[in-house]
């Protein structure tokens, strides 16, 4: 059976770093195994799910470079869920219950007060037909619970190892609400069966769903897939990540100008035994993936650390990788410009400012008018290359007697308008003689 996995976000918000970690792990696992990676949109909540968020999810995944073999929307599959409900009812595994949320809460409190675990007492199973008819005549509508078998559920978690859950310690999960809408449990299992999912890989927050889901797979006549629950991400302060926190959304990281590969590398390497480092490509990332590397503790997602990784990645990035994006930003200068400035970039869009330094217009800063005036006179004729700066600055040094910082700083300020930046040796030929001359004379150029 070939490996088939799915990434199953709800289109009720944009993806955040934690979501894409799940996506990356699934993608990497499928990629390594030569299997399939599906995108499943869990959009049964019609009020909160929007096409705009669905589109945002596709855009975020595409931006990261994650491609999927097939997209499935739960909202297209309600008839399949209804069939599963009918089958479970026919097998006596789905029963109607009528308690209101307040009544359930009261039961819980009583159980806790008596030192008992707050497990649903299955009172609804004891209702007679007449009891039910009476409740319905009062205007109550049933919700539907899945009757768990009281037995140990065991699975070998891809991340957490052997897991045992005593189903007798769990409440029978509600699968269908009183208004007829589905909770996530049933649609997820029905889809996993229909789509031939071989491995369900998701965050640790879903561990508690697994034992009931395994029983549900079996109740529907299927064999449960393998399960793996990876550690979750928390923010730099240890807070849980939420869809509402825009700062860690993929959209915000992209708008900040971070590299998709830096974001993917960071999300995939934190919380693992690998050092936090950038990969050369997603394929490389997939090749290095192993469940055994995932640590059990939550992984800290620190945007500051991501930014440093991003800068490191940019400093070594080949021109070919960024050429198209540079030209979309109207940054010219080709490979020579890229090699001159990449070491000074925190994000790719920073290249725009350096392009303006090279290409103008730029208002020079004249800190030492006499030195700049003499330097202007000494500018050699073009063509210029990597050795021009060395020769010219030596001439200026000789003519003015200035050296070290008092030589270089006024030249840098005049030529670039800034007191720091890429090597002048690389910038000077890019700036060219006309602009250099004008700037040394204090003119905007
Ligand atoms: N829609 C669920 C979530 O985003 C999917 C969980 C699962 O992978 O089973 O949490």
Image (tube, rainbow, N blue to C red):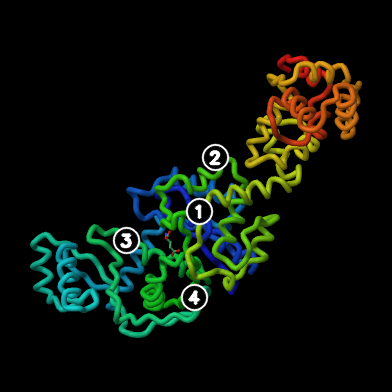
Dot 1 or dot 4: first in sequence order is: 1
Image position of 185 with respect to 351: above or below: below
Q: CA distance from mark 1 to mark 4?
A: 22 Å
Residue identifier under label 2: 255
Where on the picture, by quarter, is residue 424?
top right
- Helix, strand, or loop for circle 4? loop
- Helix, strand, or loop for circle 1? helix
Residue identifier under label 1: 17
Residue 160, numbered label: 4
Neighbours of disc 3 within 10 Å: few (<14), some (14-19), many (20+): many
Residue identifier under label 3: 182
Dot 1 or dot 3: first in sequence order is: 1
Dot 2 or dot 3: first in sequence order is: 3
**In this rendering, position of residue 207 left or right of residue 422:** left
Confirm or deny contact between disc 1 and disc 2 (CB under 8 A). Answer: no
* Any part of residue 124 in sight: no
Image position of 95 with respect to 264: above or below: below
- Percent position of residue 360, x then y: 71, 22
- Helix, strand, or loop for circle 3? loop
**In this rendering, position of residue 403 left or right of residue 129:** right
């Amino acid at each position: 059976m070939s490996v088939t996995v799915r990434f199953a976000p709800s289109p009720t918000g944009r993806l955040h770093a934690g979501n894409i970690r799940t996506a990356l792990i699934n993608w990497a696992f499928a990629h390594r195994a030569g299997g399939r990676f599906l995108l499943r949109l869990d959009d049964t909540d019609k009020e909160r799910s929007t096409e705009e968020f669905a589109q945002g999810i596709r855009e975020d995944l595409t931006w990261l470079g994650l491609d999927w073999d097939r997209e499935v929307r739960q909202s297209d599959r309600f008839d399949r869920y209804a069939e599963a409900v009918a089958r479970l009812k026919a097998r006596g595994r789905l029963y109607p219950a009528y308690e209101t949320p307040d009544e359930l809460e009261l039961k819980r409190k009583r159980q806790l007060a008596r030192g008992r675990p707050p497990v649903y007492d299955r009172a609804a199973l004891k209702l007679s037909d007449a009891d039910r008819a009476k409740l319905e005549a009062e205007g109550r509508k049933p919700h539907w619970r899945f009757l768990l078998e009281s037995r140990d559920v065991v699975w070998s978690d891809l991340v957490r190892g052997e897991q045992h859950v005593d189903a007798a310690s769990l409440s029978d999960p509600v699968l269908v609400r009183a208004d007829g809408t589905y909770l996530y449990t049933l649609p997820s299992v029905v889809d996993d069966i229909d789509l031939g999912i071989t491995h369900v890989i998701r965050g640790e927050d879903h561990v508690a769903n697994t034992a009931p889901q395994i029983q549900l797979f079996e109740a529907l006549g299927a064999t449960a897939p393998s399960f793996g629950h990876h550690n979750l991400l928390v923010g730099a302060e240890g807070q849980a990540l939420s869809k509402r926190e825009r700062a860690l959304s993929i959209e915000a990281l992209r708008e900040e100008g971070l590299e998709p590969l830096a974001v993917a590398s960071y999300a995939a390497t934190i919380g693992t035994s690998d050092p936090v480092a950038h990969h050369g490509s997603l394929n490389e990332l997939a090749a290095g993936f192993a469940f055994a590397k995932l640590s059990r503790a939550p992984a800290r997602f620190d945007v500051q650390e991501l930014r440093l990784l991003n800068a490191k990645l940019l400093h070594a990035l080949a021109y070919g990788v960024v050429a198209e994006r540079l030209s979309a930003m109207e940054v010219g200068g080709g490979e020579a410009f890229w090699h001159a400035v990449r070491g000074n970039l925190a994000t790719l869009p920073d290249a725009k400012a350096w392009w303006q330094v090279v290409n103008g217009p730029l208002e020079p800063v004249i800190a030492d008018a006499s030195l700049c005036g003499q330097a202007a006179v000494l500018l050699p004729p073009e063509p210029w290359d990597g050795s021009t700066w060395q020769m010219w600055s030596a001439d200026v040094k000789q003519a003015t007697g200035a050296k070290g910082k008092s030589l270089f700083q006024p030249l840098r300020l005049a030529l670039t308008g800034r007191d720091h930046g890429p090597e002048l040796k690389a910038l000077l030929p890019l700036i060219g003689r006309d602009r250099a001359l004008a700037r040394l004379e204090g003119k905007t150029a």
